[in-house]
Amino acid sequence: MSAGAPGGALSASGSFSADSVTLASVTIDAATNKTLTFQLEDVTKILFLSIKSSLYDGKVKVIAAGAGAKEIKLTGPVMLFGEGVALLGASLDTLKITNTDAANAVNVDVLIAAKLL
């Protein structure tokens, strides 16, 4: 990690074996939302989740399905591994993405790697 210069960097590598890899790319018009259906009700089976957005000003929000789901504002890319995915909630059956920007559409990519059994 480089914290001494503007735009610090973090580099790591590794691998894992996944039964399923899903990439969803969506455009969400200004002041609207979309719900993506992943049918992953058990977050303990999700190995990795990444969310990338074309806007990181806090006007894009995501919330997972299920009890205990917490809405998060995107102020940077989201990368969660293993048990960290549960920070979004107990289920990733759906993921609702809301764009509260009144003027700009947003492009969002969601990448998920999971175990099936």
Image: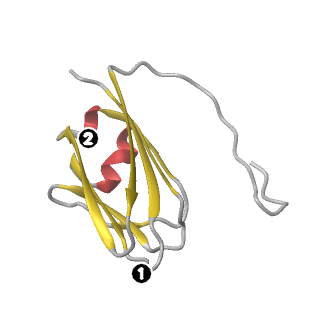
Mark 2 is on which residue type?
Val
Question: Which label belongs to residue 102?
Answer: 1
Q: Residue furthest bottom?
A: 102
Q: Which of the 4 quarters of the picture holds residue 19?
A: top left
Return the residue at label 2: 43
Query: Residue 54: x percent and y percent?
Result: 54, 59
Q: Is residue 96 left or right of residue 110?
A: left
Instruction: Give the structural element (helix, strand or loop) at label 2.
Output: helix
Residue at figure coordinates x 29%, y 25% from the top left:
115
Residue at figure coordinates x 47%, y 65% from the top left:
74
Query: Residue 83: x percent and y percent?
Result: 36, 42
Query: Residue 9: x percent and y percent?
Result: 73, 49
Front one among 111 and 12: 111
Front one among 39 and 1: 39
Instruction: Give the structural element (helix, strand or loop) at label 1.
Output: loop
Crowd rating for badge 2 (residues with CA inside 10 Å; few <14, some 14–19, many 20+): many
Question: Which label belongs to residue 70?
Answer: none
Looking at the rendered image, the quarter that the C terminus falls into is: top left
